[in-house]
Amino acid sequence: MITISFKHLIVAAVLISATVLYWQSNEKKDAKSAQYKTRTVERGDIVQSISANGTLTPVVLVNVGTQISGTVAKLYADFNDQVETGQVLAELDPALLRAQLQQSKANLLNAQVAAKIAEAKLKRNRLLKEKEFISPEALEIVEQEVESAHAQLAVSKAQVERDQANLNYSVIRSPISGVVIARDVDIGQTVAANFQTPTLFQIAKDLRQMQINISVAEADIGQLHIDQSINFTVDAFPQRKYTGTVRQVRLNPTIQENVVTYNVVAMVDNDDGTLLPGMTANIHFVVMQKND
């Protein structure tokens, strides 16, 4: 037979009371946490968008280089300068080029004299051949000498034209009208064009219209199309929203660590000049929009 002492009854009553108080306190906390906020129903715009990042670049950016090697003697353009087509940007030291041109011109004069002498000799030998004072073989040798002299004359003329062109190339001119984005040379610097054309200046044609090169994930690329609207911001003006349109969805993918992305090009108006080359754009492609 089991007997329950008075002490045990007191302990059981305390435990039951504690349990009841615990559940009551939790119910009160739940009642306090279950708060609801109300708001008047309003009409607005619902927009489905895709987020991505891109870099602002000029639509036309020309790298101005040089086809010849030499030392930069003069500079006529600097960063942010407005330039026109054909404007002189820099000059290379022309001393060696001028000397080479003078030598080529001297060789041309020598070839011209040699050609005249050969032609006169041919004329005399033809008269001798008519009188049968020389054999046909001898006349053929003189004719070959004339042809060789004419060929050497043509080579000398081509050499003069090439050296004249190299001298002209020592003056670096702007191929387009625009603004100088970068200047990569200084006076006294030697540029070598033996293996590849060195870049001296970068010129943007017109910064009033720019483009954004956007990297878009393959999961989102199927929802983009030409003339699609975009909204974007830049860190320099986080409170201002800019707009643009998709101009091109390029088919060439970029694969890095098994992640496939595609390059999308969007056009942006920049009439006020606040957007600068190289800025990072935080872009939202408008996939679907319902107004009001």
Image: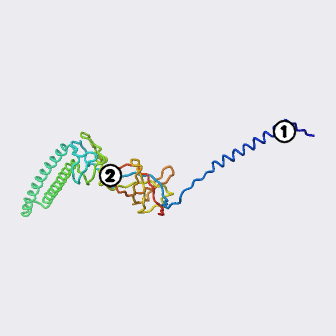
| 47 or 172: nearer the viewer | 47
The picture places residue 36, in percent across and down from the top left corner, at 60, 53
The picture places residue 254, in percent across and down from the top left corner, at 45, 53
- Residue 222, can we see it? no
Q: Is residue 281 left or right of residue 92?
A: right
The picture places residue 147, in percent across and down from the top left corner, at 16, 58
Mark 2 vs mark 1: in front: 1
Q: Which residue has dot 1 on it?
A: 9
Q: Residue at x 41, y 54 (%)?
A: 241
Q: Which residue has dot 2 on it?
A: 273
Q: Earlier in the sequence, mark 2 or mark 1?
A: 1
| 166 or 151: nearer the viewer | 166
Mark 2 → mark 1, Cα distance in angstroms: 86 Å
For the residue carrying disc 2, how many other residues have a C-alpha within 10 Å: few (<14), some (14-19), or many (20+)?
few
- Residue type (three-letter) at the residue carrying disc 2: Gly
| Image height of 4 relative to 271, above or below | above
- Residue type (three-letter) at the residue carrying disc 1: Leu
Q: Is residue 81 left or right of residue 37?
A: left
